[in-house]
Amino acid sequence: MADSLYAAVLTKFNASAALVAAIPGGLWTDQVAEGTALPFCVLLPGTKSIEWSSGSPYLETVLIQFAIFAKGLAAAEAAGDLLKAAFDFATLTFSAAVSVALYREGELPQAEELRAPDGELVYQLPIDYRVIVQRART
């Protein structure tokens, strides 16, 4: 399911012209290439649970995190606001599911200051979501 979920998230991300413009470094699901422009976003997997019905999965819950990296706190927060506007209570579509919904988890996101290898101050803003994938009962 992870590949289908990531593909659906990437499709949703790239469908928002404002989000793509605010995060020119793009959305990564793997290691970020050296020299990638800031801000960029990394999609991180979390825990997963499955509810079964008659021998097949019926409901899967997955936690994911978007981690936005930006040169300034204002840039990180502005990109985060656009990401939340695109993904809060969003529905995603992929063939293995009847419906997919995203719900933001946890407290208001707090940015963390980091130092890039070149010594530059970079902010990381984590935004957590619970993804609920419902499948047809078999």
Image (spheres, rainbow, N blue to C red):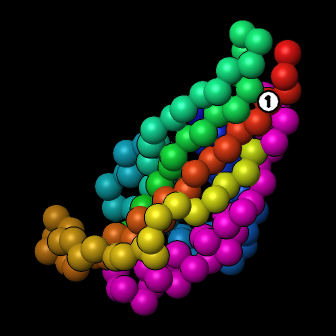
The quadrant of the picture occupied by the N terminus is: top right
Q: Which residues are magenta?
A: 70-99
Label 1 amino acid?
Arg
Work out whether 80 lies above or below 35: below
User: What residue is rendered at 77% in x and 12% in y?
Assistant: 54
Q: In the picture provided, is 51 more to the left or to the right than 76? A: right
Q: Position of residue 57 (x, y in %)?
A: 70, 21
Asked if the stretch drawn in magenta spans residue 82, the answer is: yes
Work out whether 132 lies above or below 70: above
Toward the bottom, the furthest residue is 74
* Residue 38 appears in the rendering: no
Q: Secondary structure at mark 1?
A: loop
Q: Position of residue 20 (x, y in %)?
A: 63, 69
User: What residue is rendered at 67% in x and 66% in y?
Assistant: 88
Q: Position of residue 66 (x, y in %)?
A: 48, 59
Find residue 98 and report its image quarter: top right
User: What residue is rendered at 38% in x and 51% in y?
Assistant: 32
User: What residue is rendered at 84% in x and 22% in y?
Assistant: 137
Q: 96 or 119: which is nearer to us?
A: 96
Q: Which residue is mark 1?
A: 135
Find residue 104 and report its image quarter: bottom right
Toward the top, the furthest residue is 55
Q: 28 or 33: which is nearer to us?
A: 28
Q: Position of residue 82 (x, y in %)?
A: 62, 77
Work out whether 99 lies above or below 23: above
Query: How many residues crowd mark 1 within 10 Å: few (<14), some (14–19), many (20+)?
Result: some
Asked if the stretch drawn in magenta spans residue 9, the answer is: no
* Residue 69 appears in the rendering: yes
Find residue 83 and report its image quarter: bottom right
User: How many marks can you see?
Assistant: 1
